[in-house]
Amino acid sequence: MMKSDFRTVVLFLLAGLIVCLLSGKSGVAQQPDPYRLTLLEAIQKALQANLSVLEAGTRVEEAEGTHARRFSAAQLPRVTAQTYANAQNRDLRAFGISMKGVPEVVGPFSNYDFRLYAQQNVVDLQSYHGLKASERALDAGRMDERDARDMIVRVVAGLYLNAQSATARTEAAQSRVTDSSTLLKLARDKHDAGTATGVDVLRAQVQLANDRQALLIAQNQSKQSLLELARNLGMSPATPLELAEPLDFHPLGQPEIETLAPVALVARADYLSLTSQREELLEQQRANRARSYPKLSINGNFGEIGRSIGDLRSTGLVQGQIDFTLFDRDRNGEAQELASHLKRIDDQIADLRRGIDEQLREALLNLNSASEQVAVAREGQQLARRELELAQDRFLQGTANNVEVVTAQDELARAEQNYILAVSSHVDAKFALARAMGDTQKHIVEFMGN
């Protein structure tokens, strides 16, 4: 009897274990927690993964290689080694040697030579200015990389802002659905109590259906904005994202354009790149003029030479060399090319100076306007919410139908949209100002209070 009971208990436990395993397999897989992403993290991820930044980095490396080559040609000696062993005979008649008693062909004979050759430029202004031009080109490349990073920071900040705005609209739509559900319940309760009509219930149902549809649209737009953000950060679109920083208004003191413009000209990477390119062209012009200057170099060789390996003798040579260019028509064409290029760079610098000034002034105008819009939108939002509360009280007390409530809900929805738009415009104006000032990431972090 005890054996039978023991067997029954074991079978029961096994059956329970099998049921648990099957239920675990058939259950829905647990979704991973969403990744809470801050604005600063988004910027850092984009700078690590964006293609434009990566390409700009490779161009800097290429410019570094060019500079290393120019430095080697201008400053470092060139040393080569050469060795040979040969066996030969010579036809003397082919060299105009024909004497009685002397054979026409001599040889065969052999010799061996092991030698080092070295050459060092002492005075070569063309190579020197070419080296300086490559340094300026390297500086321009680094500024181009900085400018690419600033552009990506601006783009990613805008994408993060779009996601914040979409999330805020989703939350506002969810709040309207909650209010409409409350209104529908109230209309049904009053209809059951005989103090409201069926039209009131139907009107509340229509309002709830419209708000639910608006919520679905807002939720889809929010998900799409997160997908676009993840794509530009180099993250998998399947990664669930959640914004750690909601859309919020942080006032910013209005800076003066007179103080911003000089700061921007020494911080804007695109402007600094153009100035470095201009300096590069000036060095190339100096190198062009130096093509007609004499070049002084020292070269020589040292090695062992002999008829056989056991009969090698040390020999060498040291000599100074001066080279003159007597005719070089190509220099004039190169000078014309450089002068034309320099004029183009000067025009670009002047245009960019005006463009930076315009961008700063436009950002300040938008910042000031958006600040005022936020104040007006906040007041409108408060008034619309108060209007909704009064309309709900009137409907609850039976002094009015729910037309006023539905109208007030629409007014509140419009006021909320205006507030979200105003705050988004204010944040975008701060991003634009940060881009116009240069050092975009630094100023965005400063303006956003992170």
Image: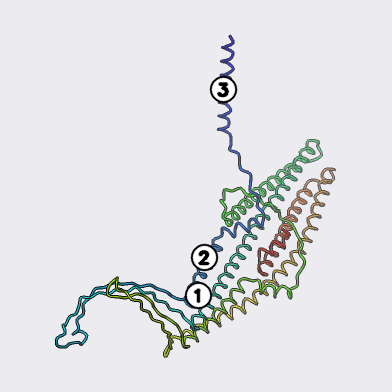
Find the distance from the CA under tag 3 to the CA under tag 2. 63 Å
390 relative to 254, above or below? above
Residue where numbered disc 3 is placed: 15
Find the distance from the CA under tag 3 to the CA under tag 1. 81 Å
> Which of the marked residues, 3 or 2, is nearer the chain's N terminus?
3
Viewer-closest of 380 and 447: 447
Q: Is residue 377 left or right of residue 19?
A: right
Q: Three-letter amino acid code at disc 3?
A: Ala
Q: Which of the 4 image quadrants contains residue 199? A: top right
Residue with the most extreme bottom position: 326
The scheme the figure's colours follow is rainbow
383 relative to 107, above or below? above
Residue where numbered disc 2 is placed: 58
> Which of the marked residues, 2 or 1, is nearer the chain's N terminus?
2
Q: Three-letter amino acid code at disc 1?
A: Phe
Residue with the most extreme left position: 101
